[in-house]
């Protein structure tokens, strides 16, 4: 096996980077008088040993043999920059609490906006993609309080929960057999709104990288419908957004990513493919004037500067300035440009997914759905009916874990698979599938090992059944 490249660094090397940089940070405050501090507690080392032991009760998220959920190791530069910032512990709500880190946040968010061609913009970091989506739908509700929010049935469940919290009316639009929003179903709902038969539509959520399947909604086509029917478009690219830099996307998906600049708002999660620690989300608005909805006064935080305080354009108050510092540092080391190291490693993730999909297609014991749009692969186990396939998938998932390979499971519509797979099964039924998110560039060289363990585990289960 080749040594993992971009995200992997021995903890000793990471700590060496940090110990080299912290004295330089301390030297930036030469005029401060000495300040006595407590001696280190001798029990601290023992407590940290206990922490290490407790943390062992985890899956090895950092290793290529973890190919399950969306858990990508933060880059060492992000870890080091975050830890360095914690020596100050800035709060990016107001400039009083995080002067340098607030400016770094503005620069980092502007770099993300440029990646999407989204300038001018209004935006900031959040504690998560969930909260970023909450702000997007909150603004949508302010602009069209009576309008329905439409999202695909494959959109993240957070939109339903957020709409409930915000008392917004959310409706789901059927997906097609590739997991993308069905344009015919969307237009039928828009026609009903135009004729007055249904509630007007305020915002359509286009998902560019569905969490379960990686599917990409046809944004360029949705934009054409916006021209005819008039509605806002929010792009939830929390997982998939960075793939706008990819050079290997299918034509339709490439068109969707190229159209992002015409959306009204975008959400992306740097703590997914952006190599950042949790939690770090980002919300961007194309119309800067939506900042008026955030307007409020704080008599004890907004007095130190006439510059914009990030808390004035955010629903969250206290936020970790360290997240902005880590993101800014990562962007300096790995610029978000097509053809660069950052983009190339995204393509390595996608190539790993395509390689696994190719192997699965040729395995008579498995049934593949549509090819991966990004770096998520879904597949089912052949069985007499969806119930048997689901049971076998669970058993293979468990056996793989016993053998050191960690996958994921997902309940998905059986229509995602060839119609002859389960003859006579209800077309609106679901089946439990195996699912793999190949987020680490190293996965591109580990596919043979993943396939070896998967095949051996499958044979054990099929012989037993």
Image (cartoon, rainbow, N blue to C red):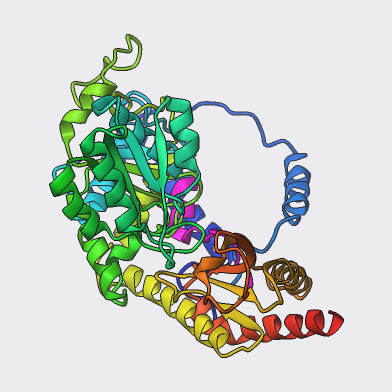
Q: Is 352 on the left-hand or right-hand side of 220?
A: right
Q: Nearer the viewer, residue 145 or 405?
A: 145
Q: Is residue 76 magenta?
A: yes
Q: Nearer the viewer, residue 236 or 114?
A: 236
Question: Please, which residue is most extreme toward the top here?
Answer: 299
Residue 331 placement (x, y as % from top left)? 32, 57
Q: Quadrant of the N terminus?
A: bottom right
Residue 76 placement (x, y as % from top left)? 48, 60
Q: Quadrant of the C terminus?
A: bottom right
Figure label count:
0
Q: Nearer the viewer, residue 261 or 409?
A: 409
State the residue at coordinates (73%, 52%).
Answer: 52
Up-down relation of residue 317 to residue 53 (above or below): above
**Residue 274, located in which quarter of the rendered image?**
bottom left
Q: Nearer the viewer, residue 432 or 313?
A: 432
Residue 247 placement (x, y as % from top left)? 28, 75
Q: Is 42 on the left-hand or right-hand side of 419?
A: right
Residue 308 in sight in this render: no
Residue 215 placement (x, y as % from top left)? 41, 63
Residues in magenta?
65-83
State the residue at coordinates (33%, 34%).
Answer: 148
Residue 434 in sight in this render: yes
Up-down relation of residue 267 to residue 68 (above or below): above
State the residue at coordinates (17%, 41%).
Answer: 230
Q: Is residue 36 magenta?
A: no
Up-down relation of residue 223 to residue 319 (above or below): below
């Amino acid at each position: 096996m080749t040594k993992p490249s971009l995200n992997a660094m021995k903890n000793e090397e990471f700590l060496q980077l940090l110990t080299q940089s912290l004295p330089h940070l301390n030297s930036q405050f030469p005029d401060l008088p000495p300040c006595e501090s407590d001696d280190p507690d001798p029990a601290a080392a023992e407590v940290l040993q206990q922490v290490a032991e407790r943390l062992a009760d985890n899956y090895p998220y950092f290793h290529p043999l973890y190919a399950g959920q969306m858990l990508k190791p933060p880059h060492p530069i992000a870890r080091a920059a975050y830890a360095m910032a914690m020596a100050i512990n800035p709060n990016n709500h107001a400039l009083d609490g995080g002067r340098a880190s607030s400016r770094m946040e503005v620069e980092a968010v502007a770099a993300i906006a440029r990646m999407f061609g989204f300038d001018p913009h209004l935006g900031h970091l959040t504690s998560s993609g969930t909260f970023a989506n909450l702000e997007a739908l909150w603004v949508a509700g302010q602009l069209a309080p009576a309008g329905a929010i439409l999202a695909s049935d494959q959109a993240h469940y957070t939109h339903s929960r957020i709409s409930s919290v915000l008392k917004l009316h959310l409706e789901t639009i059927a997906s097609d057999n590739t997991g993308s929003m069905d344009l015919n179903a969307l237009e039928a709902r828009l026609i009903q709104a135009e004729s007055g038969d249904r509630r007007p539509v305020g915002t359509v959520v286009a998902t560019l990288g569905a969490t379960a399947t990686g599917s990409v909604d046809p944004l360029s086509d949705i934009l054409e419908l916006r021209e005819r029917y008039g509605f806002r478009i929010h792009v939830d690219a929390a997982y998939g957004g960075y793939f706008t830099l990819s050079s290997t996307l299918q034509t339709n998906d490439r068109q969707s990513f190229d159209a992002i600049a015409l959306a009204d708002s975008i959400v992306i999660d740097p703590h997914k493919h952006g190599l950042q620690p949790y939690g770090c989300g980002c919300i961007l608005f194309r119309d800067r004037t939506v900042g008026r909805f955030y307007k409020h006064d704080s008599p004890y935080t907004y007095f130190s500067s006439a510059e914009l305080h990030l808390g004035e354009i955010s629903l969250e108050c206290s936020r970790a300035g360290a997240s902005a510092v880590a993101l800014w540092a990562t962007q300096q080391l790995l610029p978000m440009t097509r053809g660069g190291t950052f983009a190339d490693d995204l393509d390595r993730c996608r190539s790993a997914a395509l390689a696994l999909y190719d192997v699965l297609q040729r395995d008579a014991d498995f049934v593949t759905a549509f090819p991966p749009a990004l770096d998520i692969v879904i597949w089912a186990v052949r069985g007499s009916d969806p119930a048997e396939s689901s049971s076998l998938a669970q058993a293979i998932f468990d056996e793989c874990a016993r053998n050191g390979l960690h996958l994921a499971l997902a309940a998905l519509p059986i229509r995602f698979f060839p119609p002859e797979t389960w003859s006579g099964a209800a077309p609106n039924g679901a089946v439990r599938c195996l699912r793999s998110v190949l987020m680490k560039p190293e996965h591109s060289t580990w596919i043979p090992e993943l396939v070896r363990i998967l095949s051996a585990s499958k044979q054990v289960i099929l012989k037993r059944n």
